[in-house]
Amino acid sequence: MEIVPLSEAIGAEIRGLDLRQPQDAATVAAINDAWHEHIVLLFRGQALGLEEHTQFAGYFGEIGKHMRPKAIRNEAAELGPNVMLVSNIRENGKPIGSLPDGEMMFHSDTPYREQPDKATMLFAMEVPSVGGHTIFANSYMAAETLPEDVKRRLAGRKAVHVFEYGAVTKSGKFDRESAPHFAQPVFRKHPVTGRTALYVSELMTEEIVGLPEAESRELLDFLFAHQSQAQFCYEHVWQPDDLLIWDNRCSIHARTDFPSTERRKLRRLTVIDENPVMMGDPPGQTEVAAE
Ligand SMILES: [Fe+2]
């Protein structure tokens, strides 16, 4: 097994494995170590069926359930409660999957739950000829490079994360009565690496608890611009049979736009976190090389 970094900031490609085969304990441990170090792992040319995809996801922990809106009758419903089909493909005018169209703002997955999923795996079945890329940003680096005064203002604070079904962009004020939401630490301690990540995102994070509205807004806008800088990112251009796994505890991801006339279809599984969310201390300053 060979580990090839995908960027200076985040991500590595793992070569030399056939994931249709069961992996031995030493290989599983090596993959987990590489994942904790690189946050995003890419495996190319893996023609995985659902069973093989599920087998591989199981090496990272217990597989999560996907909440599916009742309105969506889709191919994924037949794939069982764990699978989310991310697709813009329509049959009889209705999307067969979730999150169908266009661009999607930066977010991590399921932070609006008390116990967010630690990992998400996406397997590419059909990809458009242009666009529909996934951009990943390293949230440790985002935390480490914040100005000291911002770190002080955010130390010990929580922020509210909200889920608006199917939303890919902000749709204004959320409805506290109906939208699932949860207050999570702004600085999150990773249970394995012990490092602190910035745990907010433009799509999901609505407010910083305990601050006046204007100050909360100003700080969040600053954080959203800060965390999505190119120096913290890797942009993944999908090929069919790509498998990606990422760590939602220390990264955010976004989708670039793509033509609605092209087909895009990915199979998604998540992995439950065996640890509770932990508050982290603001990290020490890290030097960032000028570009
Ligand atoms: Fe996502």
Image (cartoon, rainbow, N blue to C red):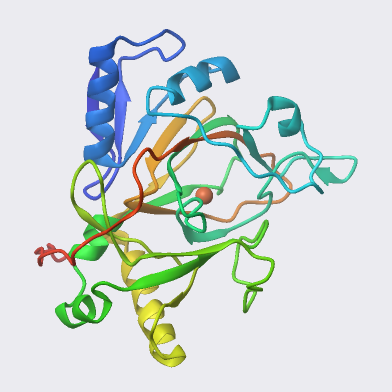
Which residue is painted at 63% across and 73% down in the image?
176
Q: Is residue 103 left or right of residue 283?
A: right
Which residue is painted at 68% across and 27% down in the image?
80
Whether residue 36 is situated above or below residue 169 in the rendered picture: above
- Determine if residue 203 is in view: no
Find residue 108 and report its image quarter: bottom left
Which residue is painted at 40% across and 84% down in the image?
216
Find residue 225 and report its image quarter: bottom left
Which quadrant is home to the N terminus? top left
Q: Is residue 226 left or right of residue 217?
A: left
Query: Where residue 37 sits: x, y (%)?
Result: 21, 39
Find residue 220 and report its image quarter: bottom left
Q: Residue furthest right?
A: 92
- Determine if residue 241 is in view: yes
Query: Where residue 278 sits: x, y (%)?
Result: 29, 55
> Nearest the camera: 10 or 72?
72
Which residue is painted at 47% across and 56% down in the image?
111
> Nearest the camera: 236 or 109?
109
Query: Where residue 164 sits: x, y (%)?
Result: 64, 63
Query: Where residue 123 sits: x, y (%)?
Result: 53, 30
Q: Is residue 140 left or right of residue 78?
A: left
Whether residue 87 is situated above or below residue 202 in the rendered picture: above
Figure label count: 0
Which quadrant is home to the C terminus? bottom left
